[in-house]
Image (spheres, grey):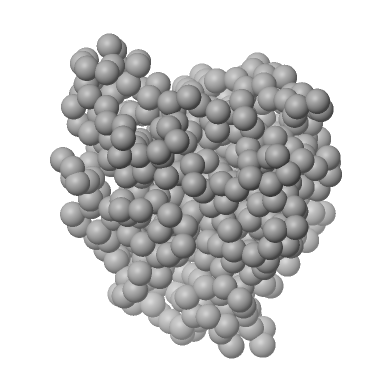
């Protein structure tokens, strides 16, 4: 944190000014006139503008707009670095992050910026906004608590040991639930991992109860939280906690008992027939939650997904990370018939991920959670809680694999044990979510080492075990400097 909470004071000025002219009512707001924290809750329109500002905070380039996904991908084994520049995630790739690095401080600050915006909003709703918003108050509060939950979950993936390591007893992050408006609130000790996850689940439970079943357009159903969005994130959170019975309970709310799997209430989530459609039409029912971009609201410079993953010079990309032939790209069971292999391009003898092919200014939306994630999470949780190889778990796995590879169909007889089925599900997740920031989430929740990787003829990175200090990012130097209770 900046001295005397300067950072949070600036945040307050920004968030309490989100009224006036609107670029795109679904995406972002900005103001021509500043208002006090009393006036921003005077009308329902001003309150809703603040809610849109909360999502804009998540969409920041240092958070879900791109870099959170990129860091989670390149820490694992599927990408090799083509650029030694530490500014473009090289330190994350090689596990050399220092507490003074911009990546460490910027990600932390981006998360707590979002959290503080949400807290300020919730405080203001109690003081005045609930009465003004009337019947919409519960929805607005639910959206703020959903956003806060996502920000806290994001923090835990970099700065705290996984929940299964000590059953949540290890140090987490400071749990700030009151908005900071001025100085004197720097000092706050870290809550345990279990306490932070407890708050995440509490926020998501509130969100599920109070969010709408759907919105008036496919766009809003993708970029704003509705009931099924909260459920999907609970599935992800419980999976990270290794609470597999709860994963089954939550996922069953939005997954039918048999194929073709779909959500029967709320937004009709379902897999798309063609995987490529998900990355060209960003508003399909498969995309549960995404970060949107358009000509007016572009990703931050040197932060766009396509800029990192497409070859140097192609559409203005920088060619920073290419696919590791020894990673999932080289997996023998990932057949040539699989359409997901078509989401690549070969350039200069290297294979590059082309899920995000739009040229600069790189306006491809960032996928945060898709319906296929819920299906595979449910499949894994069923396998981990069943005494025998479960037919529904296999059917869920087949739904994702067959969508892209009609030549491969699993049967229960293909798996001698549930461990063998779980291994197949984890491999499928590694294929399905390549370049979507999921691989590290799986490594962390299973408390596995980050695998070794090596650039041919160049730099190699040794495996990083959970006991290695580099397994987590260090606490940011600015936070340590001004928060006397953090350690």
Task: Give 394 or 98, whichever is nearer the viewer.
Answer: 394
**Left or right, 200 with reference to 486:** left
Q: Is residue 147 above or below residue 414?
A: below
Task: Give 449 or 282, whichever is nearer the viewer.
Answer: 282
Most extreme residue toward the top is 416
Residue 175 in the image: state x and y as whole percent: 57, 43
Tell me which residue sits at (49%, 47%) in the image: 342
Tell me which residue sits at (66%, 52%) in the image: 310
Residue 76 in the image: state x and y as whole percent: 62, 31
Residue 377, by quadrant, is: top left
Tell me which residue sits at (68%, 40%) in the image: 350
Q: Quadrant where the C terminus lies?
A: top right
Q: Is residue 300 above or below residue 102?
A: below
Tell me which residue sits at (66%, 87%) in the image: 33
**Left or right, 230 with reference to 73:** left
Task: Give 163 or 411, whichever is nearer the viewer.
Answer: 411
Residue 380 in the image: state x and y as whole percent: 33, 29
Most extreme residue toward the left is 257
What is the count of numbered marks?
Answer: 0
Task: Give 21 or 420, whichever is nearer the viewer.
Answer: 420
Q: Is residue 456 visible?
A: yes
Q: Is residue 235 visible?
A: no
Residue 146 in the image: state x and y as whole percent: 44, 55
């Amino acid at each position: 944190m900046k001295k005397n909470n300067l950072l949070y004071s600036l945040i307050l000025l920004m968030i309490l000014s989100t009224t006036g002219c609107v670029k795109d009512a679904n995406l972002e707001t900005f103001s021509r006139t500043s208002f006090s924290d009393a006036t921003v809750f005077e009308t329902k329109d001003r309150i809703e503008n603040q809610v849109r500002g909360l999502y804009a905070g998540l969409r920041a380039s240092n958070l879900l707009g791109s870099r959170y996904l990129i860091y989670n991908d390149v820490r694992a084994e599927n990408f090799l670095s083509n650029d030694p520049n530490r500014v473009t995630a090289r330190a994350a790739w090689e596990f050399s992050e220092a507490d003074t690095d911009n990546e460490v401080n910027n990600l932390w600050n981006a998360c707590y910026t979002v959290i503080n915006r949400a807290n300020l909003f919730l405080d203001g709703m109690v003081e005045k906004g609930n009465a003004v918003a009337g019947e919409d108050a519960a929805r607005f509060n639910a959206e703020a608590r959903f956003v806060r939950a996502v920000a806290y979950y994001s923090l835990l993936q970099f700065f705290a040991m996984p929940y299964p390591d000590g059953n949540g007893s290890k140090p987490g992050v400071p749990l700030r639930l009151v908005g900071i408006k001025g100085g004197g609130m720097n000092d706050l000790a870290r809550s345990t991992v279990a306490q932070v996850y407890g708050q995440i689940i509490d926020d998501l439970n509130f969100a599920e109860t109070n969010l709408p079943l759907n919105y008036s357009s496919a766009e809003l159903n993708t970029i704003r939280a509705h009931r099924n969005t909260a459920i999907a994130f609970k599935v992800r959170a419980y999976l990270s906690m290794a609470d597999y019975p709860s994963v089954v309970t939550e996922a069953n709310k939005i997954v039918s008992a048999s194929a073709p799997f779909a959500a029967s209430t709320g937004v009709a989530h379902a897999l798309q027939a063609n995987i490529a459609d998900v990355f060209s039409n960003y508003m399909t029912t498969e995309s549960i939650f995404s970060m949107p971009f358009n000509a007016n609201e572009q990703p931050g410079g040197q932060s766009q997904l396509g800029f990192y993953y497409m070859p140097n010079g192609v559409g203005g990309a920088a060619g920073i990370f290419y696919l590791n032939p020894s990673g999932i790209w080289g997996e023998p069971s990932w057949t040539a018939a699989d359409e997901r292999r078509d989401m690549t391009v070969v350039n200069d003898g290297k294979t590059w991920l082309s899920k995000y092919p739009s040229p600069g200014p790189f306006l491809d939306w960032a996928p945060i959670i898709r319906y296929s994630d819920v299906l595979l999470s449910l499949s894994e949780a069923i396998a981990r809680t069943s005494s025998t190889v479960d037919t529904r778990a296999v059917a869920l796995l087949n739904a994702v694999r067959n969508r892209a590879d009609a030549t491969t169909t699993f049967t229960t007889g293909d798996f001698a044990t549930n461990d063998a089925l779980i291994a197949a599900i984890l491999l499928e997740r590694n294929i399905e979510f390549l370049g979507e920031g999921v691989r590290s989430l799986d490594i962390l929740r299973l408390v596995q080492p980050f695998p070794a990787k090596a650039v041919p003829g160049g730099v190699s990175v040794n495996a990083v075990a959970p006991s290695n200090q580099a397994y987590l990012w260090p606490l940011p130097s600015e936070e340590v400097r001004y928060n006397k209770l953090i350690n």
